[in-house]
Amino acid sequence: MPPITHKEITKTTQTQFEPGDELLSVTGLRYAYHGTHEALKGVSLSIGKGEKVALVGPNGAGKSTLMLHLNGILRDKNKDPNIVISGMPMTKENLPYIRAKVGVVFQNPDDQLFSPTVFEDVAFGPLHMGYEEGEVRRRVEHALSLVGMSTYADRLSHHLSGGEKKRAAIATVLSMDPDILVLDEPSAALDPRSRRSLIELLQELPITMLVSTHDMLMVREIFPRMIIMDHGEIVADGPTDVLMDDQALLVSHGLERPY
C-alpha cells in the first residue's frame, strides 16, 4: 500500500465514530496570543472513547496551545464554544465539570506536585471537588494503584525521582476520574528505565488519551492514531503505521521516522 498523502489523509482517513462514541470534538479552533501571533488556525479534530492518539509536530506547531484549550486554561471568551467534551460545550458554566473530565498532565511534573506528600498531592483534586474524606481516600488509593505507587502515599513529593514524579502527576488527575487523559511530553527528561516504565503504564491505563510528544519510538509502540501539527494547523491525521511510512511527509514537518 503506497503512503497516504496529506490531501488523501484529510479526505479519507478522518476517524469515524458510532453515535455516542465521540468524546472530544474541536471545530475550527483559532487562537492568537496578544491578538497578533496566530497559534491555532482553524484546528478541527475528534477523538472517540478508548482511543489513544499521539499529537506530534515541531516546536511552535501549536500542540501545547491546543492542549491548554481542552480544559479551558486558554479560552477565547468572545467566541461561541467550538470545543465539546463528553457532550458538554466549553462554556463558563460547564468549566468546572469539563476540568474534571479532562486530566491534563504538564511536561514538568513539579508544576503539579506542590504538596508535602504524594497523598496530599493526589487528594487535592477530589478534595476541591467536594468529596467526603472516605471517598477522597478511596480515589487516592485507586489512582496510586493505577500508576503502581500504592506504597508511596507518605513519601515526600520533592524527593521522588523524575519517573516517580511523572507517575505521581498522572495520579493527581486520575484521582478525579477523568474521561480523557491529556499529556504534554510525558517521556521528556526520563532515563531509559523510567521511560520504559512510563510506556508500559500508558499502554496499560484503560483511558482515552491525547499525548503530545517528540518521542516517535513511543508513538509507534503505543498509539494507533497520529495527528501531525505544523504552523498552527493539522496537516495530517491517520493511522500511525501509514503516516510513519511517509518519509516525505515526516521530513516536511520536522519529524524523523524511528528505526
Image (cartoon, rainbow, N blue to C red):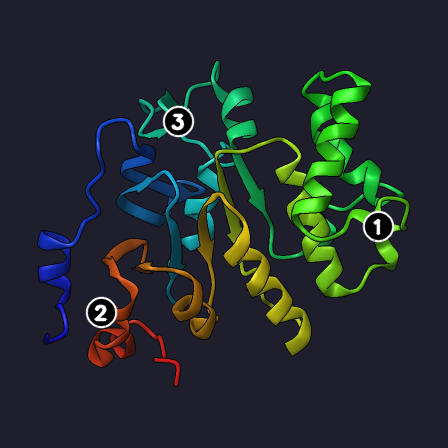
The reply to whether the C-beta atoms of the residues labelled 3 and 2 are less than 8 Å apart is no
In this view of the protein, can residue 182 be seen by the observer?
yes
Rendered image quadrant of residue 226: bottom left
Q: Nearer the viewer, residue 9 or 143?
A: 143
Q: Secondary structure at mark 3?
A: loop
The amino acid pointed to by label 2 is Val
Residue 181 location in percent, x, y?
51, 43
Q: Which residue is mark 3?
A: 86
Q: Which numbered disc flags the more N-terminal residue, 1 or 2?
A: 1
The reply to whether the C-beta atoms of the residues labelled 3 and 1 are less than 8 Å apart is no
Q: Which numbered disc flags the more N-terminal residue, 3 or 2?
A: 3
- Kindly identify the residue that appears in the image at 70 percent across and 37 percent down: 142
Query: For the residue carrying disc 3, how many other residues have a C-alpha within 10 Å: few (<14), some (14-19), or many (20+)?
Result: some
Q: Which residue is mark 2?
A: 242
| CA distance separating discs 3 and 1 | 32 Å
Residue 96 location in percent, x, y?
56, 21
In the visual, does 138 lie left or right of 75? right
